[in-house]
Image (tube, grey):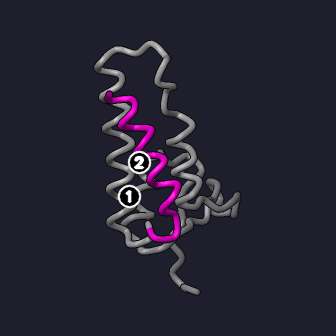
Amino acid sequence: MQSDLITISHRATIEEAAQLLSAGGFHALPVTDHDGSLQGLLTSTDLINYLLERSPEPSAPASMLERMTVLERVLKAAELYLLSGLAETEHTRLEQAITAARRQHA
């Protein structure tokens, strides 16, 4: 347990969460409100699930630019997560996110 706890605001972006999780060497972030009160816990699994849910279905109509944007976001999040050293515990979900992103690109 740490005395100087790293938290994330309930108003933070997905990108901010991914950066904190990958740079911090931990698997979860306490989520706090504007008063610093604990509102929940954000895990790397939550982040991966979010990315999987936001990926459009392969049959969904999308422009090439939209598909590339989704692919870049998923691959960036996957890369940040891999660099964090935590990927071993979430290997299957990470592979699913990468596979879904690659299907969007195909």
Q: Mark 2 belongs to which amino acid?
A: Glu
Q: Residue at x 42, y 52 (%)?
A: 16
What number of labels is visible? Answer: 2
Q: Classify residue 68 as left or right of residue 24.
A: left
Residue 99 to residue 36: above or below: above
Highlighted range, magenta? 88-106
Q: Mark 1 belongs to which amino acid?
A: Gln
Residue that label 2 marks: 15
Q: Give coordinates of residue 9: x percent, y percent.
A: 55, 55
Kindly report the distance in space between the C-alpha atoms of the residues bearing marks 2 and 1: 6 Å
Question: In this orientation, which residue lies closer to the viewer: 28 or 61?
Answer: 61
Q: Residue at x 46, y 24 (%)?
A: 58
Q: Is residue 99 magenta?
A: yes
Q: Give coordinates of residue 1: x percent, y percent.
A: 58, 87
Quarter holding the C terminus is: top left
Residue 48 to residue 26: above or below: above
Q: Are marks 2 and 1 in contact (CB under 8 Å)?
A: yes
Q: Residue at x 51, y 51 (%)?
A: 48
Residue that label 1 marks: 19
User: Most prominent secondary structure in the magenta stretch?
Assistant: helix
Q: Give coordinates of residue 36: x percent, y percent.
A: 63, 63
The kind of secondary structure element at disc 1 is helix
